[in-house]
Image (cartoon, grey):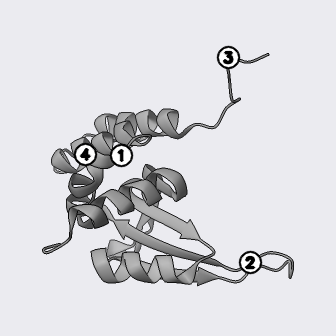
């Protein structure tokens, strides 16, 4: 990610703060060696940005790499959705670049960077605690304000 301007880093941070998701998640993995199937938990981290503006997603993909994909919605009243994603270690340089400009998702970015730094740690308790901390940071809940 060379030759990216400070303006582009700041813009990408704003898009990630407003339209993005920074996460660590747990999913099922399957080991099919030796003719047997064994299920286990596998952990991943990454970033995703969704938008109805294809140009934004193309810009993110061209500027920062990663993957982009499209989802056509069934309801004709809704706009189609475009997504850009960076997964695992590819997310580290991006997060390091946007971190000084993030306003809302600073803790999520720092947690993914901490997770990636300790990625060689195979301790399932550690990995599960990292995923649980991220779930708590990303948990939806009631909006509270100081107005009547």
Quadrant location, the C terminus: top right
Secondary structure found at label 4 = helix
Q: Residue at x 37, y 55 (%)?
A: 13
The residue beneath circle 4 is 100
Front tag of 4 and 2 = 4
The earlier-in-sequence mark between 4 and 2 is: 2
Tell me: residue 145, above or below residue 98.
above
Q: Are marks 4 and 1 in contact (CB under 8 Å)?
A: yes
The earlier-in-sequence mark between 3 and 2 is: 2
Secondary structure found at label 2 = loop
- Is residue 6 among the parts visible in the rendering? yes
Residue 3 rendering spot, x and y as whole percentages: 14, 75
Report, in whole angstroms, how far the alpha carbon at label 1 lies from the one at label 3.
24 Å
* Label annotation for residue 29: none
The residue beneath circle 2 is 79
The earlier-in-sequence mark between 3 and 4 is: 4
Report, in whole angstroms, how far the alpha carbon at label 4 lies from the one at label 2.
33 Å
Q: Label 1: few (<14), some or many (≥20) within 10 Å?
A: many
The residue beneath circle 1 is 102
The earlier-in-sequence mark between 2 and 1 is: 2
Q: Residue at x 43, y 39 (%)?
A: 134
Report, in whole angstroms, how far the alpha carbon at label 4 lies from the one at label 1.
6 Å
Which quadrant would residue 37 be assigned to in this image? Answer: bottom left
* Label annotation for residue 146: 3
Quadrant location, the N terminus: bottom left
Residue 98 rendering spot, x and y as whole percentages: 28, 54
Front tag of 3 and 2 = 3
């Amino acid at each position: 990610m060379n030759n990216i301007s400070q303006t582009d880093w700041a813009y990408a941070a704003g898009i990630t703060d407003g339209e993005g998701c920074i996460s660590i998640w747990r999913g099922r993995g399957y080991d099919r060696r030796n003719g047997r199937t064994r299920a286990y938990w596998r952990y991943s981290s990454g970033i995703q940005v969704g938008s109805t503006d294809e140009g934004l997603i193309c810009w993110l993909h061209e500027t920062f790499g990663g993957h982009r994909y499209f989802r056509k919605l069934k309801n004709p009243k809704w706009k189609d959705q475009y997504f850009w994603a960076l997964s695992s270690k590819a997310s580290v340089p991006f997060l390091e670049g946007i971190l000084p400009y993030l306003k809302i998702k600073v803790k999520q970015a720092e947690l993914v960077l901490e997770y990636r730094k300790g990625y060689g740690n195979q301790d399932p308790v550690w990995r599960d605690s990292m995923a649980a901390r991220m779930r708590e940071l990303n948990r939806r809940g009631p909006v509270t304000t100081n107005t009547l």
